[in-house]
Amino acid sequence: MPQWAQGADKVRELLELGDLQKIQGADADGQPLLDKAGRTLLSAAVLCDEDPDSSYTLAYDAARFACTALLAQQGLRPTSKGGHYAVEQAMRAQFQGHFRGFGTLRRRRNELEYPSAQEVGTTPAEAREAHVEARSIVEAAGKLMPHLSFF
């Protein structure tokens, strides 16, 4: 398969900055990460009402695992330098569409994980919305992954 053209300049930039790195071999199989995304999504659903903050965080994690699975399938992974934001940038540049909500999930998850004194936790309704968004991302990643090749 040919290299994914859309967003290739941004991916190259992320590689040059050290925010992404190339991988090969078993590390370049996105399926285990996509499977983990599905399991994490199920865990998020269980906690929506009882622990909405954890549910939201798990929904975000599921979306991140799905996005990282796409990168792995391309022979890429985020570095500790690039972190979660590098995943967001690569998704936005290459795939847009169903991955647009990933940035919102990431920013809200950061607010929950690193709260200020004025910030409060999330609600079950917000956790359910995050779950719906994450499920959309996981499903889109599952459909897209078989069509990806190495970057």
Image: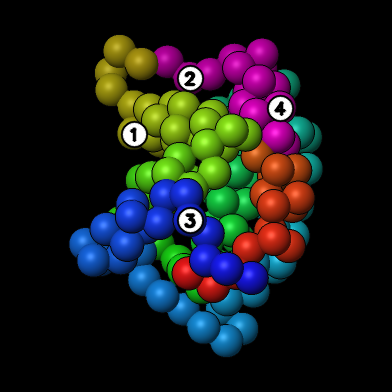
Task: Decide which of tag 1 and tag 2 comes sooner along the chain.
Answer: 1
Determine which quarter of the picture holds residue 59: top right
Q: Quadrant of the N terminus?
A: bottom right
Task: Decide which of tag 3 and tag 1 comes sooner along the chain.
Answer: 3
The image shows residue 25 at horizontal and vertical percentages of: 57, 86
Q: Badge 1 local density, few (<14 within 10 Å), some, or many (20+)? A: few
Task: Decide which of tag 2 and tag 4 comes sooner along the chain.
Answer: 2
Whole-Å distance between the Cαs marked 3 and 1? 36 Å
Whole-Å distance between the Cαs marked 3 and 2? 40 Å
- Please report the residue visible at 33 percent of the width from the left and 55 percent of the height from the top: 9
The secondary structure making up most of the magenta span is helix
Whole-Å distance between the Cαs marked 1 and 2? 11 Å
In the rendered image, residue 135 lying in the magenta stretch gets the answer yes
The image shows residue 101 at horizontal and vertical percentages of: 54, 29
Location of mark 1 (residue): 114
Q: Which mark is residue 121?
A: 2
Give the SS element for disc 2: loop
**Residue 114, can we see it?**
yes
Task: Decide which of tag 3 and tag 2 comes sooner along the chain.
Answer: 3
Location of mark 3 (residue): 5
Q: Which mark is residue 91?
A: none
